[in-house]
Image (spheres, rainbow, N blue to C red):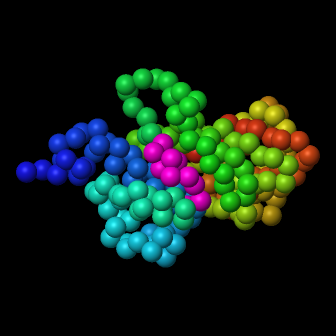
Amino acid sequence: MSDPLSPDGGNGALGGLVRDIGERVRALRQRNEFTLQDLGERTGLSLSMLSAVERGRTSPSLGTLHAIATALGVQVAALFARSGGEDTPITPLADQIVDTTDGGMVRRTAAYRADHDLEVYVDEWAPGTAHARRPSQHPGIEVGVVLEGTLDVQLGDDIYTAEAGDVAQFSGRRPHRISNEGNQTARAVWINLRRL
């Protein structure tokens, strides 16, 4: 008899949800530049449990999800961001997950498609905030379109200024930090390709 709560059990919708949670945990872990071991140390969970969660092989408890979300610096709801699908072309605003990065930037996940290695965010930087406390690096390409305000794009030792209408694009492997050093709020649409 199959376990109805397991990803391979009788409930296909639950299996899809468990896989989506696993993909989101992995993406957030990589965004934070944590290894599985780093996440294990921060959550107190075993590497085998975390690996099973990321691969969609177990239905994590609410306590497990809370520990993972806390370690990743997001609300538990952020782990339920959908990977997208073919059932509808629209992701309502109410279904888009909003969280705050460790640099104080507010990030709304507009589209998350693990199946296409695509992440699309609508980001908002209050004055003095950044996407991260220190420069980060990861696989893939970043493309950002500044909608309003001004952003400083630090790539290694170089700093570039992007104003409303400007586009920033660079390899995620370059050490980078995006910040708002001005006195007005800045907003941008930010796209990560092949980061996962």
Q: Residue at x 58, y 30 (%)?
A: 93
Toward the viewer: 109 or 116?
109
Picture layout, residue 96 above or below residue 90: below
At 73% from the left and 38% from the top, the residue drawn is: 188
User: x%, y% of residue 154?
Assistant: 78, 56
Q: Residue at x 52, y 72 (%)?
A: 42
Left or right, residue 135 beside residue 49: right
Asked if residue 117 can be seen in this view, the reply is no
Count the marks. 0
Q: Main secondary structure of the magenta part?
A: helix
In front of the other: 150 or 140: 150
Residue at 41% of width from left, 56% of height from top?
62
Residue 120 horizontal/vertical position (percent): 58, 39
Along the horizontal axis of the image, is 151 left or right of 23? right
Residue 17 occupies quadrant = top left
Residue 156 placed where, x, y %?
75, 62
Please report the bounds of the magenta region as a residue range: 72-81
Membership of 168 in magenta stretch: no
Q: Is residue 87 visible?
A: yes
Residue 86: percent from left, percent from top: 38, 27
Residue most extreme to the front: 63
Q: Is residue 170 left or right of residue 54?
A: right
**Is residue 76 in the magenta section?**
yes
Outermost residue, left side = 1
Q: Residue furthest right?
A: 183
